[in-house]
Image (tube, rainbow, N blue to C red):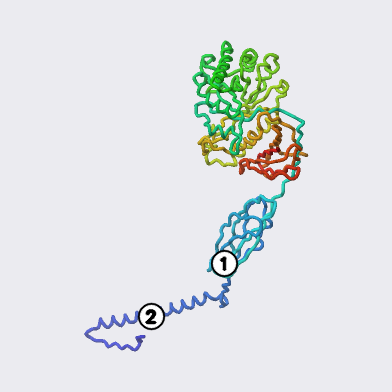
Amino acid sequence: MISFEKLNFVENPFLPTTFSHLKKNMLVIRKLCVVSLIVFFSTILFFASCSEDDNGEEVDKTVVLSFEQSSFPENLDAAGGSFSLEIDWAFTQWDITTEVVKGDAFISTILPSEGGSIMEAETSSFVEITYAANGKTTENWQKLILKSLKDEVSEEIVLKQSGRVAPTTTKLTLDPTVVHQTIAGFGGANMIWGTDYLTESEMDMAFGTGEDQLGLSIYRVRLPSNRDDWAGLVNSVKMANSRNAKVLASPWSPPSEWKSNNSTNGGGYLLKEHYSDFANYINEYIQFMADKGAVIDAVSIQNEPDWKVDYEGCEYSVAEMYDFVRNYAGVIENAKVVAAESLNSNQAYTSDILNDATAVDNLDIVGGHLYGGGLAAYPLAHEKEKEIWMTEYLLNLNSGNVSSNWTEYTDQETIWDETMEMLEGIHSSMAFDWNAYIWWYIRRYYSFLGDGNNGTQRGKILKRGYAFSQYSKFIRPGYQRIDVSPEGVSTLKMTAYSGEGNTVIVIINPSEYSARTIEVELPSSATSAVSYTTSSGLNRNLNDNILNEDNVIVELPKESITTIVLQ
């Protein structure tokens, strides 16, 4: 080091400025060195102080890592849910993993699943844990493992999830000696306008009774107002005939020249002077089909005579329908006559007919729809020994008016809720002793087979198809409804049927919250039992392990339909 104090400067009179400046510069350098030394020692003192507390002692950097005991949940609910867990930590990074101890894994997410810092003193973090429902009656145990990433520190806790409460068992009693109506069938409609009818494979899927088929037994077609359209239906009718399905033909309008408005569209009524012409027209249609090898089993007088529409239609008053059936329908041959296919099964349209000794002989089937109501018992029809057919209904989340209600993104639970509404309607119609239930289009995005629209695949069985088949596949034409009743009060909706040596029980569990269990004694004539269930998560799921000695025990999931077949 140079000592500036020992330097002697001799002034030269000839160079006064040069040496004077040099001396001043040396003094500046000396001052800078002093400042640097001060900064250096201050820095050392600062870092030294960082390792000491206010009392001059070193800070404890011991790693801390543990679950906060007070945040531990008690037994977790079988229904699933979420909770927060507190973690105490210091000077470490950590993560959380899981391990199944007993039963099944049930923890779905841990957020965050890692955290901490090697530089931070003692602090707390919260993690959110979600867990799935436990579908079993036994407990699930799952371990949470909290572990430091670098240090030998860890802690474990075991979370326990309760098993679901076993549903209360409802005992059922069958009484085959109490016989109600004979079932004509369950079905759906062909495309009414246009010619994109069901293909061979779609007919197989709709009317077959195999593993991946729906078992429909009634096929509704249009009776066209133009003779030129008759031929186009022949092959479709024949395909239904070959699959043992009954065919119902419904007219939307008589030929335009016989109507008050001279048009098949926009309402209007059939002129009185053409009643006979139209009765003969229906006969000609039946005969035309027969000549081509196509059988029409039933014909309607008019689709929805009490509803004026812009599209194809025709209006009849109650008196006009009575007049037509009484005085003209008697000439219709080789097919059963259906009336009146009212919009909401208005019994006024058929009561006068049933009470008239002449008219009643010209009517075979009371038909009606369910738009806006109409689902009720009809004792007069039974008294006159007439079958009751529900010949058209649909539910589509009102997507016909608001297309965004049903798209490929529509929540499946929403669709299932509406499907449950359909099923409860079928149940009620059977409980009211109706003989047949016919849905609208068989192939439509809101029906039984997809049509390629609104996120569906053409020809693929939809959820609603599986649900409908819980009736159609197992309750065959000719089966009779018999008595079945629960022991005590029950919210379950059930009907039972007998035929071909089988006993079939269909049960709807409408509960949104809980499963149910039913028990029924195996009839002496039966040796086997299976069940099939459709719900939001099941498609006609088979269970062949329901027989316990002489009793059948079946668990019914929430919001589901189950068909039990005893053979």
Is label 1 in a helix, a strand or a loop? strand
Q: Nearer the viewer, residue 173 or 96?
A: 173
Residue 516 appears in the figure: no
Residue 551 appears in the figure: yes
Judging by the rendered image, the residue that carries numbered circle 2 is 33
Crowd around label 1: few <14 · some 14–19 · many ≥20 (10 Å): many
If the image is split into quadrants, where does the C terminus sit?
top right
Q: Position of residue 99 (x, y in %)?
A: 61, 60
Is label 2 in a helix, a strand or a loop? helix
Query: For the residue marked with disc 2, what is the amino acid?
Result: Cys
257 relative position to 496: left or right: left
Q: Position of residue 131 (x, y in %)?
A: 62, 53
Query: Do callouts 2 and 1 mark residues in contact (Cβ within 8 Å)?
Result: no
325 relative position to 166: left or right: left
Query: For the residue marked with disc 1, what is the amino acid?
Result: Ser
| Residue 148: numbered disc | 1
Say which quarter of the image contains residue 37: bottom left
Crowd around label 2: few <14 · some 14–19 · many ≥20 (10 Å): few
